[in-house]
Image: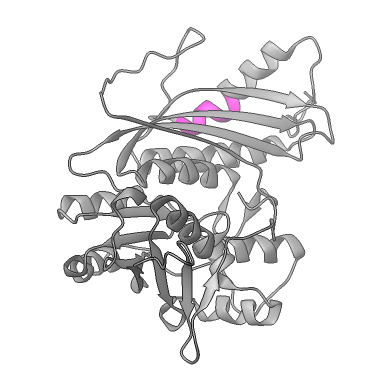
Amino acid sequence: MNQDNSRIILAHGNGGKLQADLLANWIFPEWGGVVLPADRDSQIMPWSSSQLVMSTDSFVVDPLFFPGGDIGHLAVCGTTNDLAMSGAEPRFLMCSFILEEGLPLNDLRRVARSIGQVARELKLQIVGGDLKVVERGKGDGMFINTSGVGCLRGGKTPGPERLRPGQRVLVSGDLGRHGLVVLLSREGIQFTSELQSDCAPLWPAVRALQDAAIDLKCLRDLTRGGLATALHELAQSSGQSFLIHENHLPLLEPARGACEVLGIEAVYLASEGTMLVVVDEEDVAPTLEILRARSGHQLACEIGQVVSTNPDLGPETRLQAEWGAPRRLGPLLYEALPRIC
Protein backbone atom coordinates (compact mmCIF):
# COMPACT_ATOMS: atom_id res chain seq x y z
CA MET A 1 0.00 0.00 0.00
CA ASN A 2 1.47 3.40 -0.88
CA GLN A 3 2.15 5.98 1.81
CA ASP A 4 -0.75 8.33 1.15
CA ASN A 5 -3.21 5.46 1.62
CA SER A 6 -5.20 6.68 -1.38
CA ARG A 7 -4.92 3.55 -3.47
CA ILE A 8 -4.92 -0.19 -2.99
CA ILE A 9 -1.71 -1.86 -4.14
CA LEU A 10 -1.35 -5.64 -4.18
CA ALA A 11 0.83 -6.86 -1.34
CA HIS A 12 2.13 -10.18 -2.59
CA GLY A 13 2.81 -12.57 0.25
CA ASN A 14 1.13 -10.24 2.74
CA GLY A 15 -2.51 -10.58 1.71
CA GLY A 16 -3.75 -11.36 5.21
CA LYS A 17 -2.45 -8.10 6.65
CA LEU A 18 -3.80 -6.13 3.68
CA GLN A 19 -7.24 -7.67 4.10
CA ALA A 20 -7.27 -7.04 7.84
CA ASP A 21 -6.24 -3.41 7.32
CA LEU A 22 -8.88 -2.76 4.67
CA LEU A 23 -11.63 -4.30 6.81
CA ALA A 24 -10.58 -2.63 10.06
CA ASN A 25 -9.83 0.84 8.70
CA TRP A 26 -11.89 1.32 5.54
CA ILE A 27 -14.98 -0.91 5.68
CA PHE A 28 -16.03 -1.80 9.24
CA PRO A 29 -16.07 1.86 10.40
CA GLU A 30 -18.77 2.50 7.78
CA TRP A 31 -20.80 -0.47 9.05
CA GLY A 32 -21.08 0.65 12.66
CA GLY A 33 -24.14 -0.84 14.32
CA VAL A 34 -24.87 -3.36 11.56
CA VAL A 35 -21.74 -5.53 11.29
CA LEU A 36 -21.63 -8.70 13.38
CA PRO A 37 -17.93 -9.57 13.90
CA ALA A 38 -16.72 -13.16 14.19
CA ASP A 39 -13.44 -14.71 15.31
CA ARG A 40 -13.97 -17.83 13.21
CA ASP A 41 -14.39 -18.65 9.51
CA SER A 42 -18.15 -18.95 9.77
CA GLN A 43 -20.84 -16.95 11.55
CA ILE A 44 -23.26 -18.20 14.18
CA MET A 45 -26.34 -16.06 13.67
CA PRO A 46 -28.46 -15.21 16.73
CA TRP A 47 -31.73 -16.24 15.14
CA SER A 48 -33.53 -19.36 13.99
CA SER A 49 -36.55 -19.96 11.81
CA SER A 50 -38.23 -22.79 9.98
CA GLN A 51 -39.09 -20.43 7.10
CA LEU A 52 -35.76 -19.27 5.78
CA VAL A 53 -35.48 -17.47 2.45
CA MET A 54 -32.07 -17.10 0.80
CA SER A 55 -30.75 -15.25 -2.23
CA THR A 56 -27.36 -14.44 -3.71
CA ASP A 57 -26.24 -12.14 -6.49
CA SER A 58 -23.09 -10.58 -7.94
CA PHE A 59 -22.85 -6.96 -9.01
CA VAL A 60 -20.55 -5.69 -11.77
CA VAL A 61 -22.14 -2.36 -12.65
CA ASP A 62 -20.27 0.08 -14.88
CA PRO A 63 -19.78 2.86 -13.82
CA LEU A 64 -19.31 2.11 -10.12
CA PHE A 65 -20.94 5.44 -9.22
CA PHE A 66 -24.00 6.78 -11.03
CA PRO A 67 -26.67 9.43 -10.30
CA GLY A 68 -28.83 8.08 -7.50
CA GLY A 69 -26.55 5.28 -6.32
CA ASP A 70 -23.40 3.22 -6.56
CA ILE A 71 -22.39 -0.43 -6.68
CA GLY A 72 -22.68 -0.80 -2.88
CA HIS A 73 -26.16 0.69 -2.66
CA LEU A 74 -27.17 -1.46 -5.63
CA ALA A 75 -25.77 -4.66 -4.11
CA VAL A 76 -27.72 -4.39 -0.85
CA CYS A 77 -30.92 -3.29 -2.56
CA GLY A 78 -30.65 -5.98 -5.23
CA THR A 79 -30.27 -8.88 -2.81
CA THR A 80 -32.75 -7.68 -0.18
CA ASN A 81 -35.30 -6.87 -2.90
CA ASP A 82 -35.07 -10.47 -4.12
CA LEU A 83 -35.93 -11.61 -0.58
CA ALA A 84 -38.79 -9.11 -0.35
CA MET A 85 -40.35 -10.44 -3.56
CA SER A 86 -41.05 -13.67 -1.66
CA GLY A 87 -42.64 -11.65 1.13
CA ALA A 88 -39.61 -12.21 3.35
CA GLU A 89 -38.10 -9.74 5.78
CA PRO A 90 -34.35 -9.35 5.09
CA ARG A 91 -32.39 -10.17 8.26
CA PHE A 92 -28.77 -11.03 7.43
CA LEU A 93 -26.32 -10.16 4.67
CA MET A 94 -22.96 -11.55 3.60
CA CYS A 95 -20.87 -9.21 1.48
CA SER A 96 -17.73 -10.08 -0.51
CA PHE A 97 -15.51 -7.70 -2.47
CA ILE A 98 -13.15 -8.30 -5.37
CA LEU A 99 -11.02 -5.16 -5.68
CA GLU A 100 -8.66 -4.21 -8.47
CA GLU A 101 -5.15 -3.02 -7.74
CA GLY A 102 -5.12 0.77 -7.95
CA LEU A 103 -8.69 1.28 -6.72
CA PRO A 104 -8.83 4.54 -4.71
CA LEU A 105 -9.42 3.70 -1.07
CA ASN A 106 -11.83 6.59 -0.79
CA ASP A 107 -13.97 4.86 -3.41
CA LEU A 108 -13.98 1.73 -1.28
CA ARG A 109 -14.98 3.74 1.76
CA ARG A 110 -17.73 5.48 -0.17
CA VAL A 111 -19.16 2.14 -1.31
CA ALA A 112 -18.91 0.69 2.20
CA ARG A 113 -20.72 3.75 3.54
CA SER A 114 -23.59 3.18 1.09
CA ILE A 115 -23.87 -0.45 2.16
CA GLY A 116 -23.94 0.57 5.82
CA GLN A 117 -26.61 3.20 5.24
CA VAL A 118 -29.01 0.78 3.54
CA ALA A 119 -28.30 -1.94 6.11
CA ARG A 120 -29.19 0.44 8.94
CA GLU A 121 -32.34 1.53 7.12
CA LEU A 122 -33.46 -2.10 6.84
CA LYS A 123 -32.24 -3.11 10.34
CA LEU A 124 -30.08 -5.65 8.53
CA GLN A 125 -27.04 -7.31 10.10
CA ILE A 126 -23.91 -7.91 8.02
CA VAL A 127 -22.68 -11.27 9.26
CA GLY A 128 -19.72 -12.15 7.03
CA GLY A 129 -18.03 -11.98 3.68
CA ASP A 130 -14.67 -11.91 1.98
CA LEU A 131 -12.23 -9.48 0.40
CA LYS A 132 -9.75 -10.17 -2.38
CA VAL A 133 -7.45 -7.91 -4.42
CA VAL A 134 -6.54 -8.81 -8.01
CA GLU A 135 -3.93 -7.41 -10.38
CA ARG A 136 -4.51 -4.18 -12.24
CA GLY A 137 -6.65 -4.69 -15.32
CA LYS A 138 -8.32 -7.88 -14.03
CA GLY A 139 -11.03 -6.56 -11.72
CA ASP A 140 -12.51 -3.49 -13.44
CA GLY A 141 -12.43 -1.50 -10.23
CA MET A 142 -14.70 -3.49 -7.97
CA PHE A 143 -17.06 -6.45 -8.03
CA ILE A 144 -19.38 -7.26 -5.12
CA ASN A 145 -21.19 -10.47 -4.22
CA THR A 146 -23.96 -10.34 -1.63
CA SER A 147 -25.96 -13.19 -0.12
CA GLY A 148 -29.04 -12.52 1.95
CA VAL A 149 -31.10 -14.47 4.46
CA GLY A 150 -34.68 -13.51 5.27
CA CYS A 151 -37.68 -14.75 7.20
CA LEU A 152 -41.15 -15.31 5.80
CA ARG A 153 -43.84 -13.38 7.58
CA GLY A 154 -47.35 -14.66 8.23
CA GLY A 155 -49.87 -15.08 5.45
CA LYS A 156 -49.66 -16.64 2.01
CA THR A 157 -46.38 -16.41 0.14
CA PRO A 158 -46.59 -14.45 -3.14
CA GLY A 159 -45.52 -16.37 -6.23
CA PRO A 160 -46.36 -17.15 -9.86
CA GLU A 161 -48.29 -20.27 -8.82
CA ARG A 162 -50.97 -17.98 -7.35
CA LEU A 163 -51.66 -16.08 -10.59
CA ARG A 164 -55.24 -16.40 -11.93
CA PRO A 165 -57.22 -14.68 -14.73
CA GLY A 166 -58.95 -11.52 -13.55
CA GLN A 167 -56.23 -10.43 -11.14
CA ARG A 168 -54.86 -6.92 -11.61
CA VAL A 169 -51.28 -6.00 -12.46
CA LEU A 170 -49.77 -2.94 -10.78
CA VAL A 171 -46.35 -1.34 -10.73
CA SER A 172 -45.09 0.46 -7.65
CA GLY A 173 -43.48 3.37 -9.49
CA ASP A 174 -42.13 4.71 -12.75
CA LEU A 175 -40.26 2.44 -15.16
CA GLY A 176 -36.80 2.12 -16.64
CA ARG A 177 -34.89 4.80 -14.76
CA HIS A 178 -31.97 2.69 -13.52
CA GLY A 179 -31.11 1.19 -16.89
CA LEU A 180 -31.43 4.56 -18.58
CA VAL A 181 -29.28 6.37 -16.00
CA VAL A 182 -26.50 3.77 -16.23
CA LEU A 183 -26.56 4.02 -20.02
CA LEU A 184 -26.42 7.83 -20.01
CA SER A 185 -23.66 7.86 -17.36
CA ARG A 186 -21.56 5.31 -19.21
CA GLU A 187 -21.82 7.05 -22.54
CA GLY A 188 -21.53 10.58 -21.16
CA ILE A 189 -24.87 11.61 -22.68
CA GLN A 190 -26.33 14.78 -21.15
CA PHE A 191 -29.99 15.79 -21.17
CA THR A 192 -31.44 19.04 -19.86
CA SER A 193 -33.20 17.32 -16.96
CA GLU A 194 -31.12 15.20 -14.64
CA LEU A 195 -32.35 11.67 -14.09
CA GLN A 196 -31.41 9.58 -11.07
CA SER A 197 -31.53 5.82 -10.65
CA ASP A 198 -34.58 4.58 -8.76
CA CYS A 199 -32.37 2.11 -6.85
CA ALA A 200 -33.99 1.64 -3.42
CA PRO A 201 -34.98 -1.13 -1.00
CA LEU A 202 -38.47 -2.51 -1.64
CA TRP A 203 -38.98 -4.29 1.67
CA PRO A 204 -40.52 -1.27 3.49
CA ALA A 205 -43.28 -1.06 0.84
CA VAL A 206 -43.88 -4.82 0.92
CA ARG A 207 -44.06 -4.77 4.71
CA ALA A 208 -46.59 -1.91 4.62
CA LEU A 209 -48.80 -3.92 2.26
CA GLN A 210 -48.51 -7.00 4.45
CA ASP A 211 -49.34 -4.98 7.56
CA ALA A 212 -52.53 -3.80 5.82
CA ALA A 213 -53.47 -7.47 5.15
CA ILE A 214 -53.28 -7.03 1.37
CA ASP A 215 -53.28 -10.49 -0.25
CA LEU A 216 -50.22 -10.19 -2.48
CA LYS A 217 -50.65 -12.78 -5.20
CA CYS A 218 -47.29 -12.20 -6.87
CA LEU A 219 -44.37 -9.79 -6.62
CA ARG A 220 -41.45 -9.31 -9.00
CA ASP A 221 -38.70 -6.68 -9.10
CA LEU A 222 -38.10 -5.26 -12.56
CA THR A 223 -34.35 -5.60 -12.92
CA ARG A 224 -32.47 -7.10 -15.88
CA GLY A 225 -34.76 -7.08 -18.93
CA GLY A 226 -37.30 -4.74 -17.34
CA LEU A 227 -41.06 -5.10 -17.18
CA ALA A 228 -41.41 -7.05 -20.42
CA THR A 229 -38.95 -9.77 -19.41
CA ALA A 230 -40.43 -10.06 -15.90
CA LEU A 231 -43.92 -10.55 -17.34
CA HIS A 232 -42.65 -13.08 -19.87
CA GLU A 233 -40.95 -15.12 -17.14
CA LEU A 234 -44.07 -15.04 -14.96
CA ALA A 235 -46.24 -16.12 -17.90
CA GLN A 236 -43.98 -19.06 -18.67
CA SER A 237 -43.76 -20.22 -15.06
CA SER A 238 -47.47 -19.77 -14.26
CA GLY A 239 -49.13 -20.75 -17.55
CA GLN A 240 -51.18 -17.53 -17.37
CA SER A 241 -51.09 -14.58 -19.77
CA PHE A 242 -51.03 -10.81 -19.34
CA LEU A 243 -52.65 -7.87 -21.12
CA ILE A 244 -50.83 -4.60 -20.45
CA HIS A 245 -52.05 -1.15 -21.51
CA GLU A 246 -49.25 0.92 -22.98
CA ASN A 247 -50.82 4.29 -22.13
CA HIS A 248 -50.97 3.27 -18.44
CA LEU A 249 -47.21 2.70 -18.13
CA PRO A 250 -45.73 5.34 -15.78
CA LEU A 251 -42.65 7.14 -17.11
CA LEU A 252 -41.05 10.36 -15.97
CA GLU A 253 -41.08 12.86 -18.80
CA PRO A 254 -37.25 13.10 -18.98
CA ALA A 255 -37.11 9.31 -19.23
CA ARG A 256 -39.80 9.26 -21.90
CA GLY A 257 -37.92 11.88 -23.90
CA ALA A 258 -34.60 10.08 -23.58
CA CYS A 259 -36.17 6.80 -24.72
CA GLU A 260 -37.65 8.51 -27.77
CA VAL A 261 -34.36 10.15 -28.70
CA LEU A 262 -32.34 6.96 -28.21
CA GLY A 263 -34.92 4.62 -29.75
CA ILE A 264 -35.21 2.49 -26.60
CA GLU A 265 -38.35 0.72 -25.37
CA ALA A 266 -38.81 1.54 -21.69
CA VAL A 267 -40.44 -1.85 -21.00
CA TYR A 268 -37.00 -3.48 -21.46
CA LEU A 269 -35.09 -1.08 -19.21
CA ALA A 270 -34.18 -2.12 -15.67
CA SER A 271 -35.77 -0.57 -12.61
CA GLU A 272 -34.06 -1.18 -9.26
CA GLY A 273 -36.68 0.37 -6.97
CA THR A 274 -39.92 -0.54 -8.73
CA MET A 275 -41.81 -3.82 -8.41
CA LEU A 276 -44.67 -5.52 -10.15
CA VAL A 277 -47.56 -6.29 -7.79
CA VAL A 278 -50.49 -8.60 -8.63
CA VAL A 279 -53.62 -8.41 -6.46
CA ASP A 280 -57.34 -9.12 -6.70
CA GLU A 281 -59.50 -6.35 -8.13
CA GLU A 282 -60.90 -5.35 -4.72
CA ASP A 283 -57.36 -4.81 -3.41
CA VAL A 284 -56.27 -2.41 -6.15
CA ALA A 285 -57.43 0.81 -4.47
CA PRO A 286 -55.97 0.12 -0.99
CA THR A 287 -52.72 -1.15 -2.52
CA LEU A 288 -52.25 2.00 -4.58
CA GLU A 289 -53.13 4.21 -1.61
CA ILE A 290 -50.47 2.55 0.54
CA LEU A 291 -47.82 2.64 -2.18
CA ARG A 292 -48.44 6.25 -3.22
CA ALA A 293 -48.03 7.38 0.39
CA ARG A 294 -44.43 6.13 0.38
CA SER A 295 -41.42 7.96 -1.01
CA GLY A 296 -40.43 6.71 -4.45
CA HIS A 297 -43.81 5.12 -5.17
CA GLN A 298 -45.97 8.15 -5.92
CA LEU A 299 -46.47 7.02 -9.53
CA ALA A 300 -47.77 3.56 -8.59
CA CYS A 301 -50.62 2.56 -10.87
CA GLU A 302 -52.57 -0.28 -12.43
CA ILE A 303 -51.20 -1.25 -15.85
CA GLY A 304 -53.16 -4.37 -16.84
CA GLN A 305 -54.54 -7.73 -15.82
CA VAL A 306 -53.94 -11.45 -15.84
CA VAL A 307 -55.93 -13.08 -18.67
CA SER A 308 -56.70 -16.60 -19.79
CA THR A 309 -54.16 -18.27 -22.06
CA ASN A 310 -55.09 -19.24 -25.60
CA PRO A 311 -54.10 -22.92 -25.79
CA ASP A 312 -53.02 -22.46 -29.43
CA LEU A 313 -50.63 -19.63 -28.55
CA GLY A 314 -49.44 -20.56 -25.08
CA PRO A 315 -48.77 -18.13 -22.24
CA GLU A 316 -47.87 -14.65 -23.47
CA THR A 317 -47.78 -10.97 -22.66
CA ARG A 318 -49.61 -8.59 -24.97
CA LEU A 319 -49.14 -4.83 -25.01
CA GLN A 320 -52.23 -2.86 -26.01
CA ALA A 321 -51.49 0.53 -27.54
CA GLU A 322 -54.13 3.28 -27.59
CA TRP A 323 -54.89 2.39 -31.21
CA GLY A 324 -54.67 -0.88 -33.10
CA ALA A 325 -54.36 -4.51 -32.10
CA PRO A 326 -52.20 -5.60 -29.16
CA ARG A 327 -48.71 -6.81 -29.94
CA ARG A 328 -46.87 -9.64 -28.26
CA LEU A 329 -44.05 -8.72 -25.88
CA GLY A 330 -41.20 -11.19 -25.78
CA PRO A 331 -38.27 -11.31 -23.37
CA LEU A 332 -35.07 -9.37 -23.84
CA LEU A 333 -33.25 -11.74 -26.20
CA TYR A 334 -29.79 -10.27 -25.72
CA GLU A 335 -28.11 -8.01 -23.21
CA ALA A 336 -28.90 -4.65 -24.76
CA LEU A 337 -26.90 -2.93 -22.02
CA PRO A 338 -24.50 -5.17 -20.09
CA ARG A 339 -23.09 -4.36 -16.65
CA ILE A 340 -26.19 -2.57 -15.25
CA CYS A 341 -26.27 -4.53 -11.99
User: Which residue occupies 53% across, 42% down?
Assistant: 75
Magenta-drawn segment: 25-31
Q: Quadrant of the N terminus?
A: top right
As drawn, the residue found furthest toward the bottom would be: 323
Closer-to-camera residue (4/268):
268
- Which quarter of the picture shows residue 209? bottom left
Residue 166's spot in the image, x, y percent? 26, 68
Residue 87's spot in the image, x, y percent? 30, 44
Closer-to-camera residue (302/177):
302
| Dominant secondary structure of the residues highlighted in magenta in the image | helix
Q: In the rendered image of this protein, does residue 305 appear above or below residue 270?
A: below
Q: In the rendered image of this protein, does residue 292 appear above or below residue 100?
A: below
Question: Total label count?
Answer: 0
Residue 309's spot in the image, x, y percent? 39, 65
User: Which residue occupies 84% across, 36% down?
Assistant: 137
Q: In the rendered image of this protein, does residue 267 appear above or below residue 55?
A: below
Residue 97's spot in the image, x, y percent? 62, 30
User: Which residue occupies 40% across, 80% down?
Assistant: 248
Closer-to-camera residue (303/81):
303
Q: Is residue 30 magenta?
A: yes
Q: Is residue 249 magenta?
A: no
Q: Name the colour scheme.
A: one colour
**Residue 197 seen:** no
Q: In the rendered image of this protein, does residue 283 appear above or below residue 246?
A: above
As drawn, the residue found furthest toward the front would be: 312
- Which quarter of the picture shows residue 126? top left
**Residue 48 seen:** yes
